[in-house]
Amino acid sequence: STIQDTSGGFIAAWVDYKNNNSNIYAKKIDSHGNIMWDKSIIFYPYSEGMIGRPQIIGDNLGGAIIAWLVYNNSNPNIPSQTLMAQKINANGDLLWGENGIKIPVISWVSFVWRETTYKQDISPSVAFDIAPDGKNGFIITWNDLRNFSLDPYTNIFGDLSAQRVDANGNFLWG
């Protein structure tokens, strides 16, 4: 995922799969092709699963906000997917801690299908998107499956949920 920065350069974020792990990197390049951040920045080094689907937006200050999914493959006691976000300033510094912030979107539900009860993690597996909020923060939306139903005449697609996050990584809505 790539965006143009405020000075005519660009910031790119991508997933790199090495040593059976996945990490998200970002790099800033100026308008002349010079690398502005002397190293790629690693986001959320996660050894118990995979991370992916980074989305990036500018922060209007020469930095960026990046959101991504964490896919947990090994721990059955936590939901299989989590949304994360990180803010980087124009100098490449991580502003929301080493691992970024966790977007609180996951819930566990139980449902019965064909006389069997299942404990299922309901997560933003279908889609998520981010957009700037005009105040150096962002709004994230996702397909919320907490009200999901197996009955094809009710809510088989779930709901749309959203959260606004300010420039400091604070959640502003509910």
Image (cartoon, rainbow, N blue to C red):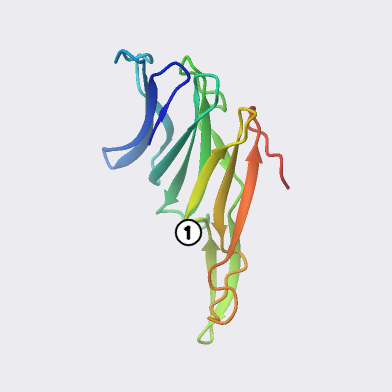
Residue 79 at x, y percent in the picture: 52, 56
Screen quadrant of the N terminus = top left
Q: Residue drawn 57% across and 82% down?
A: 153
Which residue is labeled 1 in the image?
76
Residue 45 at x, y percent in the picture: 41, 35
Q: Residue drawn 57% across and 70% down?
A: 148
Residue 133 quadrant: top right
- Residue extending furthest left? 19
Residue 78 at x, y percent in the picture: 53, 54
Q: Residue drawn 32% across and 40% down?
A: 21
Residue 112 at x, y percent in the picture: 56, 80
Find numbered disc 1 in the image and state the secondary structure of the residue it sits on: loop
Q: Residues within 10 Å of mark 1 (few under 14, many from 20)?
A: few
Q: Return the residue nearer the eye: 47 or 164.
A: 164
Q: Amino acid at mark 1?
A: Pro
Q: Return the residue nearer the eye: 45 or 86.
A: 86
Viewed as shown, does residue 169 lie left or right of 14? Answer: right
Q: Residue drawn 57% across and 44% down?
A: 140
In the image, is residue 16 above or below residue 94? below
In the image, is residue 141 above or below residue 85? below
Number of numbered tags placed on the structure image:
1
- Residue extending furthest bottom? 115
